[in-house]
Image (tube, helix red, strand yellow):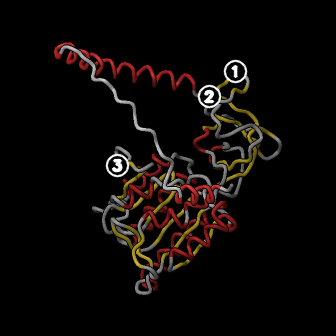
Amino acid sequence: MAAFELGAWYGMQGGIAKTAPREKKPALMHPVRSACATTVRAQARPALNRRVRVLRLALEPAPPVIGDHRVPKTFRIGDSVYVPSSQLGAAVQIDQAFYRTNVVARRDRSVQVGIPGGGVSGWIATSRLHKMLGVAVITIGDFQTEEALLNPLSKSVLQFCRLLLDDSSVVSVRIRAISELGEWWKNNHLAYSHIVMIGHGSRDGIVFGVGGLRKAVSFDRRVAVHGGPKRVFISLCCETGRAPFARDFSALQICGNLMAPFHSVHGAVASQFCQTFLTWHILQGKSVKVAYRNAAASVPGNDSYKLWRAGNLVRGN
């Protein structure tokens, strides 16, 4: 019998009859002793919880071991990675900001990679490597400010990204409905690690020309449903760095980091923040947090950006 057939049959039968619970006789205990026993149990509960947590950590599987080094699962020998050219040393001359190569050795949180000519690089921190690298500049049109604001902002970010990466790693997408975003994402999302969203927004969501304001739950249904690795999202939409949108969006399965303005932001300032962050993160190989702090410090005036991770505002920003 199929599961749905069983469910239908169960509903027709009105549920399975349950036997009456056995009557429990009240326990006889002196009221003072009863209060003492309750107090002892309450005091013992935190200690029991600590022991359970320790036991759970002890039972968790250890990371894989290669040689004498305990290695996280992020990178393995033979993996194809993107390495900032600045990390390969002055002797290695590469025209592009990144060099695609393979991991040849691993030690703790550092790796060695192959370099042109058959040599091997020095030790490079794994935080500076990328398994995939691509930037998608997504412009969310509103029919009203596209020519005067959104399109020029999109072009400035796009051309800057083309200076960092080759054309095959950068794409510009223009949409006006979240359904369009969902269709594009379904077919192309695995090629891009950094997503720049350009449009209008508020603390509740991002405004689409077709369909109006969309909250984080709409992105969950249209975008996150397709899965994939966590990505870096840079929102240049006003006020999207506030809760509830930033909190809920950064908690989505596809979002590793979300940077977004806390207030209304001028288009030129938004472009500057985005370009500065990408310079520190992609060109210089800094971590998201370090690159974010440097970019936020360079923004003039009272315009401020916030960094969110896993539904929480990252401290220190």
Of marks 1 and 2, the one in the foreground:
2
Q: Which residue is pictured at 53% across the width and 53% down the height?
A: 253
Viewer-side label of 3, 2: 2
Please provide percent x and percent y for residue 147: 46, 85
Along the viewing direction, whichever of 35 and 195 lies nearer the viewer:
35
Whether residue 204 sits left or right of residue 275 in the image: it is left
Q: Is residue 8 left or right of residue 115?
A: left
Residue 69, position as x, y percentages in the image: 67, 24
In the rendered image, the vertical position of residue 150 relative to residue 304, given as above or below? below
Pointer 3 or 2: first along the chain: 2
Q: Callout 3: helix, strand or loop?
A: loop
- The residue that mark 3 highlights is 317
Count of marks overlaid on the render: 3
Circles 3 and 2, Cβ within 8 Å, touching? The answer is no
Q: Position of residue 22 (x, y in %)?
A: 39, 30
Is 165 left, or right, of 194 in this rendering? Answer: right
- Please tell me which residue is depicted at 47% across the width and 80% down the height of the picture: 141
- Residue at point 66% right, 61% down? 191
What distance separates the C-alpha of mark 1 from that of mark 2?
Answer: 17 Å
Alpha carbon separation for disc pair 3 and 1: 38 Å
Which of the pair 42/250 is nearer the observer? 42
Q: Between disc 3 and disc 1, whose residue precedes?
A: 1
Q: Are the two marked residues, 1 and 2, in contact with CB atoms closer than 8 angstroms? A: no
Q: Secondary structure at mark 2?
A: loop
Q: Where on the picture, by quarter, is residue 200?
A: bottom left
Q: Name the residue beneath numbered marker 2.
A: 61
Disc 1 secondary structure class:
loop
Density class for disc 2 (Cα within 10 Å; few <14, some 14-19, many ≥20) is few
Checking the image for residue 68, the label placed there is 1
Callout 3 amino acid: Asn
